[in-house]
Image (cartoon, rainbow, N blue to C red):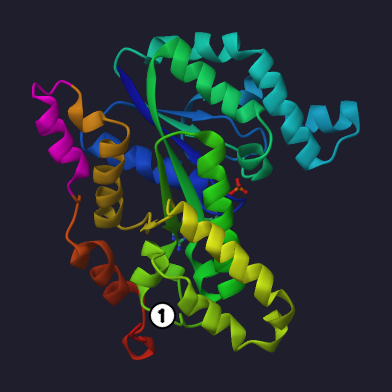
Amino acid sequence: MVFGQVVIGPPGSGKTTYCNGMSQFLQLIGRKVAVINLDPANDSLPYECAVNIEDLIKLSDVMMEHSLGPNGGLVYCMDYLEKNIDWLQARLAPLLKDHYLLFDFPGQVELFSLHSNAKNVIMKLIKNLNLRLTAVHLVDAHLCSDPGKYVSALLLSLSTMLHLELPHVNVLSKIDLIENYGRLAFNLDFYTDVQDLSYLQHHLDQDPRSAKYRKLTKELCGVIEDFGLVNFTTLDIQDKESVGNLVKLLDKTNGYIFAGMEASAVEFSKIAVGATDWDYYRVAEVQEKYMDDETLNFND
Ligand SMILES: Nc1nc2c(ncn2[C@@H]2O[C@H](COP(=O)(O)OP(=O)(O)OP(=O)(O)O)[C@@H](O)[C@H]2O)c(=O)[nH]1
């Protein structure tokens, strides 16, 4: 069985940096890693990639030939990739024996919440090559400092989860910069655990600019809470402890830790439902490390 990650998230959320850092970390702990660049807009890659979509199609050529902008060009490239899935499968074939795969995808969010090409590419690979993949959805942590942007990040995460139908981990990336654009109104666990958005509603009501959207925001928060699917883990890609904690979680979601394990279904499910870390390490330690003590507000 071949395991790996599908790395997605809005432009600038840190996907390419993640693929570079994650591949280095995994190699250090003894795994053979192959990074597959499927973002035709990635011009200078910090990692050595095993497969590069640029060898199949170039975004600049598409934009010129079809008079498309960058967004339309990327949709075209994904469509072209889907039609030429054999090309990708042939290049992945030699890696399947012993590599862990990291797929670096483009940042256009509509590719993962609206259009079906990228999803079809992933599903074909999973089916034809028997892959076990987890979607790693990166969202810039600084969005937490603005309640409106945080609600958008929740909605985007939810629609991506529902669209892709893969094992899915939402990550607040660049957690070291979380308070760069302002203090957070609540403790970090409020943003990671997404337990009660009514507090956020109250906070939004204090801002006269959001008065017009009060009812809409309330209804959207209701949708997010009714699904009860979205939560976040945190990541500072420069911190090996932070990357290590994420790897533990990902290994559970794509089944890597179960590979080669001889155990009963009961034992498997005990590991699967158990927490990967104590709450202290998961949130409080991260908060102590990256958020200013004096700015801490207590949710209750
Ligand atoms: N401080 C900090 N910076 C980070 C982290 N991860 C990424 N960055 C920075 O964020 C910026 C954007 O990162 P990229 O990896 O290019 O983001 P991307 O999602 O691949 O961007 P697109 O290719 O445009 O979609 C770069 O300047 C990175 O150095 C992090 O954990 N901490």
Residue 266 lies in the magenta-colored region: yes
- The residue wearing badge 1 is 186
Q: Which residues are magenta?
A: 260-274
Q: Quadrant of residue 109?
A: top right
152 is higher (above) or lower (below) than 205: above
Is the C terminus in the top left, top right, bottom left or bottom right quadrant? bottom left
Other-residue count near label 1 (Cα within 10 Å), few / some / many at <14 / 14–19 / ≥20: some
Residue 116 lies in the magenta-colored region: no
Q: Residue at x 53, y 17 (%)?
A: 124
Relative side of 207 to 63, left or right: left
Relative side of 123 to 66, left or right: left
> Is residue 99 shown to the viewer in this render?
no
Q: Residue at x 49, y 34 (%)?
A: 165
Judge by depth and name the residue closer to the eye, 259 or 237: 259
Judge by depth and name the residue closer to the eye, 220 or 160: 220
Amino acid type of the residue that numbered disc 1 sits on in the rendered structure = Phe
Relative side of 137 to 276, left or right: right
User: How many numbered badges does the structure rendering display?
Assistant: 1
240 is higher (above) or lower (below) than 20: below
> Where in the figure is residue 52, as x and y percent of width and height?
57, 25
> Where in the figure is residue 152, as x and y percent of width and height?
60, 61
Q: Residue at x 39, y 20 (%)?
A: 131
Determine whether the beta carbon of the residue marked 1 sits less than 8 angstroms from the nearest atom of ligand 1.
no
> Where in the figure is residue 60, as x and y percent of width and height?
78, 33
Is the N terminus in the top left, top right, bottom left or bottom right quadrant? top left
Question: Which is the main secondary structure of the residues drawn in magenta?
Answer: helix
Relative side of 27 to 5, left or right: left
> Where in the figure is residue 262, as x and y percent of width and height?
8, 21
